[in-house]
Amino acid sequence: MVRRVGIVGYGHLGQYLVSEIEKRSDIELAFVWNRTQESMTGKVAEDIILKDLGSFKERNADLIVEVAHPSISQQYGPSFLAHSDYMIGSPTALSDSGLESSLRAAALQHGLYVPSGAFWGGEDIKKMADRGTLQALKVTMKKHPSCYKLNGEIEALNKSVSDKAVTLYEGSVRGLCPVAPNNVNTMAAAAMAANNLGFDTVQGCLVSDPQLRDWHIVEVEVWGPGDMAAGRAFHVKTVRSNPANFGAVTGSATYASFLSSMLGAHSKGSGVHLC
């Protein structure tokens, strides 16, 4: 059976997904929507372009994939879930506890899928969280200053970075998501996987490093069963080095990872799923 997929957003990632879907026979485009319609002219078939996102129901998509902005989930997330599976490409939106609750409540007949992206080991961490054995989780992201799109005080701090690495933020993922919504989707996915800890307890660290012109670094550190205070607890640390173009928000390997997540976002039923 051919699955119908609606793509919400036509930036770099949206364009990549559209191109990959068009190459396949097991899925097809139900629609593509973008805030700026002109950017799709001549690139997306006219009958595929959805001009009013509010009329998404008419296209009968099996899966809707958001790769636009966290505000899409605020405005349309529950409505999407009432009619189809929904893959939230900007999971930083879930740092809003009210939205997280409303989307969980809406995922009664269809699944809410959270892509793992650059979050390495997500399924294993979720298993630990489900068993209640996950004690702590910290995700550290290191990028060149030009790769960050930030708000508030840390934006000014990032602009002041010159020749040495600077830690822009260290604390709860919930506190970080609103000031770095385009950069820390990996951390938001971590907070969703670590469901016994959540956004308030999972720790995020954002480092601006002028030496990282070609790489994005993501470190995931996990503590499990045992005595953490005595240093005798289960502990794993992974370091993911993702090639990235200079100034790019998204690393090169993340595109293929996101595609894999999209292809796996089906048949898991209602509720929230990491993919």
Image (cartoon, rainbow, N blue to C red):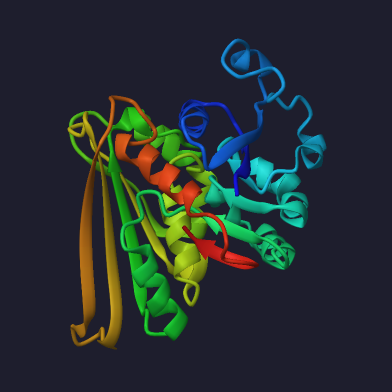
Q: Position of residue 13 (x, y in %)?
A: 47, 32
Image quarter for residue 58? Answer: top right
Left or right of 187 in this view: 143: left
Residue at left offset 46%, top offset 32% = 20
In the depicted structure, whether residue 114 falls above or below residue 157:
below
Please give the name of the residue rendered at 59% of the width and 36% of the height, measured from the top-left corner.
28
- In the image as oriented, which residue stretches furthest toward the top? 42
Q: Residue visible at 33% across and 58% down?
A: 139
Q: Nearer the viewer, residue 230 or 244?
A: 244
Count the labels in the image: 0
Q: Is residue 138 above or below residue 250?
A: below
Residue 181 on image: x %, y %: 51, 43
| Residue 19 seen in render | yes
Residue 160 visible from this viewpoint: no
Residue 53 in the image: above or below residue 48 = below
Would you say 159 lies left or right of 20 here? left
The foreground one among 167 and 174 is 174
Q: Position of residue 17 (x, y in %)?
A: 49, 33
At 28% from the left and 26% from the top, the residue drawn is 245
Where residue 66 appears, as percent x and y from the top left, is: 60, 41
